[in-house]
Image (spheres, rainbow, N blue to C red):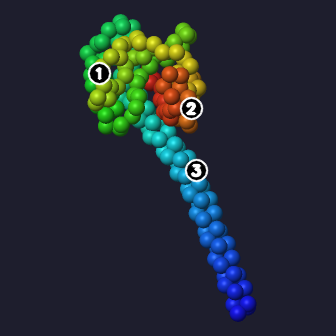
Amino acid sequence: MEKRTSNTSLATRTAAVVIAFIVICSIVTGIISYVIYRRDSIEMSAQRAEAVAAIIAGVIDPAGYREAMDSGERTPYWQELKGYLDQARRDVDMLYLYVMDADYSAEEAVYFISGVGPDETDDAELWDTDSLDAFAPEMYRSLARGISTQTGIYMSEGYGLMVSGFAPVFNE
């Protein structure tokens, strides 16, 4: 009888070790899967934001843009582009979608236009400004190099954690 008790005890210990090993492997697999999913999700969001920025930049007419910026008025072109950005923001489900002026010699960035979501009011004005700290350094690199770019996660002053895409609008 003594021998049987020791076999049962060995079987119980072996089963406990196997169960513990399975639980540990499951936890490690879950953590690794989460990290990979999060990284891929952030990368996909950044690529999507960059693609949307490039498409929006490609639609902008530089002459119409410059006319509205120089006059400071909502020109017919501005109104047309505003409608396009509002619709694009709804279609692509972005939190923010805007076009800014490339002159950063001042202390603030100047908004040209902002897309409005379905449940928002249109309170964006031509020439509204924001602190330069509210934008990722990639925006300035995009303008300086003339290429579209994207960010990883960054903290935007007053807006929280973001992933962004930027694309320059060319004069010609």
Q: Quadrant of the N terminus?
A: bottom right
Question: Mark 2: which amino acid?
Answer: Tyr
How would you rate the neighbour count of disc 1 (Cα within 10 Å): few for under 14, some for 14-19, many for 20 or more?
few
30 horizontally vs 167: left or right: right
Foreground of the two, 92 or 145: 92
In primary-sequence order, the first of circles 1 and 2 is 1
Foreground of the two, 12 or 158: 12
Q: Quadrant of the C terminus?
A: top left
Identify the secondary structure beneath mark 3: helix
Foreground of the two, 10 or 113: 10
Question: Mark 3: which amino acid?
Answer: Val
Q: CA distance from mark 1 to mark 3?
A: 37 Å
Q: Position of residue 81 (x, y in %)?
A: 31, 23
Q: Position of residue 59 (x, y in %)?
A: 36, 29
How would you rate the neighbour count of disc 3 (Cα within 10 Å): few for under 14, some for 14-19, many for 20 or more?
few
Q: CA distance from mark 3 to mark 2?
A: 17 Å
Identify the secondary structure beneath mark 2: strand
Identify the secondary structure beneath mark 1: loop
- Identify the residue position indicated by label 1 in the image: 121
- Identify the residue position indicated by label 2 in the image: 154
Q: Are marks 1 and 2 in contact (CB under 8 Å)?
A: no
> What residue sits 70% from the left and 82% below the top?
10
Residue 35's tag is: 3
6 horizontally vs 105: left or right: right
Residue 121 found in image quarter: top left
> What residue sits 66% from the left and 82% below the top?
11
How would you rate the neighbour count of disc 2 (Cα within 10 Å): few for under 14, some for 14-19, many for 20 or more?
some
In primary-sequence order, the first of circles 1 and 3 is 3
- Considering every residue shown, the one lying at the far top of the view is 71
Foreground of the two, 25 or 45: 25
